[in-house]
Image (tube, rainbow, N blue to C red):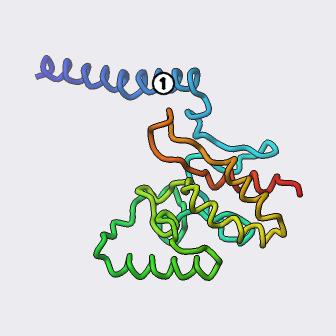
Amino acid sequence: MLNHLRPAFTLVLALTVLTGLAYPLAINGIAQTVMPDAANGSLIRRDGKIVGSALIGQNFASDRYFWPRPSATGPDPYNAAASSGSNLGATSVKLKDRVAADVAKLAGEGVAAPVPGDAVTTSGSGLDPHVSPAFAMAQAARVAKARGLDPAAVASLVARQVEKPTLGVIGEARVNMLELNLALDALKM
């Protein structure tokens, strides 16, 4: 019996070392060498302090900031530990009521109709840090008014923050809300 268990134990131990230690360490070493920023979470720093990640949205609620799209991570928006979609389908009354309330709220804040779809819908992960340029631009007047800034200057800032599709064709144009709000804070007028 020992003759049958020894090779099985040796194989389990070898595969554990190979796939549980050597492979992850090798991949991490390559990632740290080739793309250290992405390997470390695409962290955004300001004055030497980490303020967030370019990959995970944050819940900006003040009128002084551009708002992100809704988050589906439950009562704590943009909680990476609770990443998930809402799983509400097109016939869901709960979804319909939430979207209608969000549209009414945005209209009350001066966002003109038609409201961009990403202004009232969650992303698949509930963590997307990006919004469409249309949603960002729709908020420019509100943010300018709350900060006492020239609306044209805020709109120009939004236009400068638009990220083009990857390689010009993959994905859509988008605006990272954290980076836009950090640029807004740095705006001197």
Q: Is residue 132 left or right of residue 146?
A: left
- In the structure shown, which secondary structural element does the residue marked by tag 1 occupy? helix
Q: Amino acid at mark 1?
A: Leu
Residue at figure coordinates x 81%, y 68% from the top left: 147
Q: Position of residue 87 (x, y in %)?
A: 33, 66
Q: How many marks?
A: 1
* Residue 132 or residue 125, whichever sits in front: 132
Q: Position of residue 105 (x, y in %)?
A: 57, 80
Q: Position of residue 100 (x, y in %)?
A: 46, 80
Residue at figure coordinates x 69%, y 64% from the top left: 140
Residue at figure coordinates x 78%, y 72% from the top left: 145
Depicted 98 relative to depicted 43: above or below: below
**Label 1 Cα neighbours within 10 Å, binned few <14 / some 14-19 / many ≥20:** few
Depicted 35 relative to depicted 46: above or below: above
Residue sitting farthest toward the left? 1
Q: Looking at the rendering, which quadrant does residue 34 occupy?
A: top right
Q: Is residue 68 left or right of residue 171?
A: right
* Residue 80 or residue 23, whichever sits in front: 80
Image quadrant containing the C terminus = bottom right
* Residue 10 or residue 26, whichever sits in front: 26
Q: Is residue 17 left or right of residue 2?
A: right
* Residue 21 or residue 174, whichever sits in front: 174
Q: Position of residue 168 (x, y in %)?
A: 50, 36
Residue at figure coordinates x 62%, y 82% from the top left: 108
Image quadrant containing the N terminus = top left
Kindly identify which residue carries mark 1: 25
